[in-house]
Image (spheres, rainbow, N blue to C red):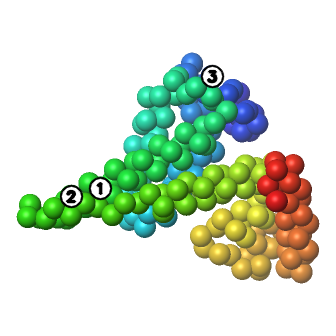
Amino acid sequence: MSATKYKSFGDPELISLCLKGDPQAWETLILRYRRLIYSIPVRFSFSAADCSDVFQAVCLRLIEHLGELKDDTKVSSWLITTTTRQCIHVRTQKHRENSTDDEFDEPADPGHSVEEIRIQSQEQQRVREAVDQLSDRCKQLVEMLYFDHRNPSYEVIAQTMHMPVASVGPTRARCLEKLRTVLRRQGIH
């Protein structure tokens, strides 16, 4: 089966294939959610190494508990909760490592900020899922404009997408309107 075909599968189909030992399904599932998973430790202001550790721990937990997911249509919610808990665990461990035996300070209660992170992560995941529903051209443009950490210029985008520089702005506007339509259909305004 081609990699493109796997991308069209929903989470329930991918999970079923993963449980049967299909490595391409597993890779597709992880690629689908890697930004979501990484975004949470980044919001905790973790180092790159700690972000990678959290990512690996969450992927391991996903492998271990994939068959136990009560609702395989809620993978993103499970990942947000699991990743947030892992981040709290890492933060607590770091606090313990950095404190002396004479200190009895409890780590700061992350309650409010953790809830904000969870809500933001869910909203961002919905936007990512909506972007995935766009045409390949719009998806590529939106990703370059809003998700590419290098912040490419219109010139670089035009060259990459084989279009005139003057077309980037109008194309962007059309793609964002399509994205708004997808988000409205999902109940996001």
Q: Quadrant of the N terminus?
A: top right
In space, the residues marked 3 and 1 are separated at their CA atoms by 35 Å
Residue flagged by tag 1: what amino acid is it? Thr
Relative to 97, is 87 on the left or the right? right
Image-quadrant location for residue 177: bottom right
Q: Earlier in the sequence, mark 3 or mark 1?
A: 3
At horizontal 43% and vertical 35% (from top left) the residue drawn is 61
Residue highlighted by disc 2: 96
Relative to 77, is 143 on the left or the right? right
In space, the residues marked 1 and 2 are separated at their CA atoms by 6 Å
SS at badge 3? helix
Q: Position of residue 103 (x, y in %)?
A: 13, 65
Q: Quadrant of the C terminus?
A: bottom right
Residue flagged by tag 3: what amino acid is it? Ser
The mark total stands at: 3
Toward the viewer: 116 or 56? 116
SS at badge 2? helix
At horizontal 77% and vertical 80% (from top left) the residue drawn is 155
At horizontal 40% and vertical 43% (from top left) the residue drawn is 57
Q: Position of residue 18 (x, y in %)?
A: 57, 26
Which of the numbered marks, if any, corresponds to residue 16? Answer: 3
Residue highlighted by disc 1: 92
3 vs 2, front mark: 2
Query: Badge 1: few (under 14), some or many (20 or more) residues near its Cα, within 10 Å?
Result: some
